[in-house]
Amino acid sequence: MNKNSFWENKKVLITGHTGFKGSWLSVWLIKKGAKVSGISLEPKTKPSLFKELEIAGKLQNNYIQDIREKTKLQEIIENIKPDIVFHLAAQPLVRESYKDPLGTWDVNVMGSLNVLYSLSKLSNLCAVLMITTDKVYKNKEWEFGYREIDELGGHDPYSASKAACEIAIESWRSSFCNASDHSLSNLAIATARAGNVIGGGDWAKDRILPDTIKSLYKNEAIIVRNPEAKRPWQHVLEPISGYLFLAEKLYVTQQNIKFEKNNPFSSSFNFGSNLESNKKVSDLVNQILLYWQGSWKIDTNKNYLHEAKQLHLNTDKAFQILDWYPLWDFETTIKRTVFWYKNFYKKGIKAFDLCIDDITYFENNKFI
């Protein structure tokens, strides 16, 4: 991926480009020579990775726009005429979804459909990757990973809205991108599912990694809500590398197939962590403390919202079809993440340089 020229001068649109994952994706695509445009709200965290990266001037277009405003969204997309779209804009927090369930459903479902509707007006070839989450699966607290064919569902408003979004996307693809009907055959749409990503520059509320770093920076004890909960920890570059693989396959295949054929990459894909990275929250915190001295204690507040005890993804499909696999083990993921923050806070290294360093290290390890 770091050796081909596919991304050079490609017109790429990222919705949610000011968010954590969108910011990392923007940097990687800029590094690859893509012409990147973004549609998003203003960053909600202070500090924010997007602002710390200082990349607004490196974008072709930087639209601060709510995707629920369909008319304006359509106007912007028709102006950009993207070759490839990464749709990340969403209300991404479980706890926030309890506070604003209607807003969460509105953004995550209707906002996504607004994007698809606007893209349907394009006449050019366009590959569309809709990013959802690992939480689209009905959580049965299984020991084994969820597959793309497993049942969708969701307990909290965030998870349920994302599961509903997957259903809506599949309906849209079946109804309006059916190659046998020659309808919207210029669009190829896939969904990508990942979760619990960590990495430098995440300052979101109510997330264990940002909360831990904040406590360490302030020399305070880390407060842990649910130390026994298991999560599949993965560096943010892992799923993003999957997104890049899938989007390229989507575009190239759609460019070459005949009208009577369906794009085999136009479906759902899991991009999860290594199995050994499925660790308890307490394991995560203790691993962080190997690189940044501190302490932690259990939160005595029992007024918790519902949280899954364990959830991880089966990535066999991505490996077999895309030849994609997670690269970094648990130790490498935590070490690179903690050092990003330590270098940012204690050495004053710029966020852009830190991200480029991680991306280059990742590319050199995975693709050479």
Image: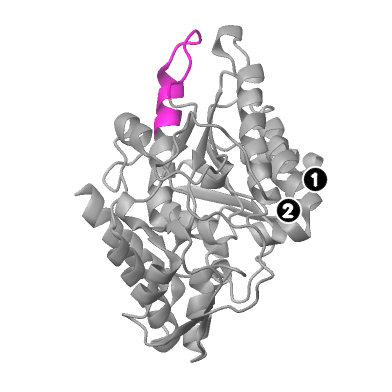
Q: Which quadrant holds the N terminus?
A: top left
Tell me which residue sits at (45%, 30%) in the image.
251
Q: Quadrant of residue 109?
A: top right
Question: Is residue 31 in view?
Answer: no
The x and y percentages for residue 21 are: 51, 57
Q: How is the image coloured?
A: one colour
Q: Is residue 118 magenta?
A: no
Tell me which residue sits at (80%, 40%) in the image.
71
Q: Which residues are magenta?
A: 249-264
The x and y percentages for residue 219 are: 48, 92
Q: Amino acid at mark 1?
A: Glu
Q: Is residue 18 left or right of residue 279?
A: right
How many residues crowd around disc 2 within 10 Å: few (fewer than 14), some, or many (20 or more)? some
Q: Is residue 277 above or below residue 175?
A: below
Task: Pick whichever, 66 or 99, lies toward us.
Answer: 99
Marks 2 and 1 in Cβ contact (< 8 Å): yes
Question: Is residue 255 in view?
Answer: yes
The x and y percentages for residue 22 are: 54, 55
How many residues crowd around disc 1 within 10 Å: few (fewer than 14), some, or many (20 or more)? few
Q: Is residue 360 left or right of residue 194?
A: left
Give the number of marks: 2
Q: Quadrant of residue 305?
A: bottom right
Question: For mark 1, what is the residue?
Answer: 69
Q: Is residue 259 magenta?
A: yes
Tell me which residue sits at (77%, 45%) in the image.
106
Q: Is residue 21 above or below residue 209?
A: above
Secondary element under disc 2, as helix, strand or loop, is loop
Q: Is residue 71 left or right of residue 307?
A: right
Q: Amino acid at mark 2?
A: Gln
Question: For mark 2, what is the residue?
Answer: 65
Toward the bottom, the furthest residue is 219
Q: Is residue 309 above or below residue 154?
A: below
